[in-house]
Image: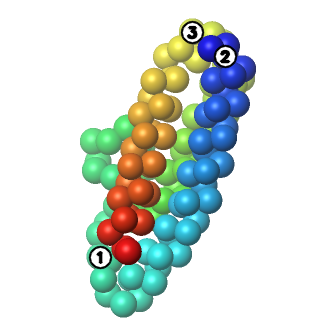
Amino acid sequence: MSKESVLIQLQENVKIIYHKAVDADKQLAELREQKKASFAQIFAADSAFKNHSDTFLPYVEELAADLQAIQTDDEDHYKKLLPNIVVKIELLFKMLTSLKTNLK
């Protein structure tokens, strides 16, 4: 798969994650109002993310920044950062799916 194809696929995944994150953050806000969500951050401190937040959008912003970085950098930096971006995408998809499933 070419670098351009990979970048297009990653961008599509980030778009999907963004929309799911907006919905999830709304649900989390409602749960907080009902005193049913009292956690400090979504992902553990030792996760792939540098950000730590009790909402999803800061994680999505970090992912988008990483994606932007690999589009402008050289090939070696692309190859170095790509696995971390894939891990972040997987973590976000899993957590967003888990949240949606648990709220049904």
Q: What residue type is labelled 1?
A: Ser
**Colour scheme shown:** rainbow
Dot 1 falls on a residue whose secondary structure is loop
Q: How far apart are marks 1 and 2 (CA)?
A: 41 Å
Q: Which of marks 1 and 3 is nearer the N terminus?
A: 1
Camera-side residue of 85 and 74: 85
Camera-side residue of 48 and 96: 96
Dot 2 corresponds to which residue? 3
Q: In this image, 3 relative to 35: left or right?
A: right
Tag 3 and tag 2, C-beta contact below 8 Å:
no
- Specify the label residue 76 is tagged with: 3
Give the mark count: 3
Image location (x, y in percent) of residue 42: 35, 59
Dot 1 corresponds to which residue? 38
Q: Which amino acid does label 3 sit on?
A: Asp
Q: How far apart are marks 3 and 2 (CA)?
A: 12 Å
Above or below, 14 against 8 in this view is below
Q: Which amino acid does label 2 sit on?
A: Lys
Residue at point 38%, 74% (across, down): 104
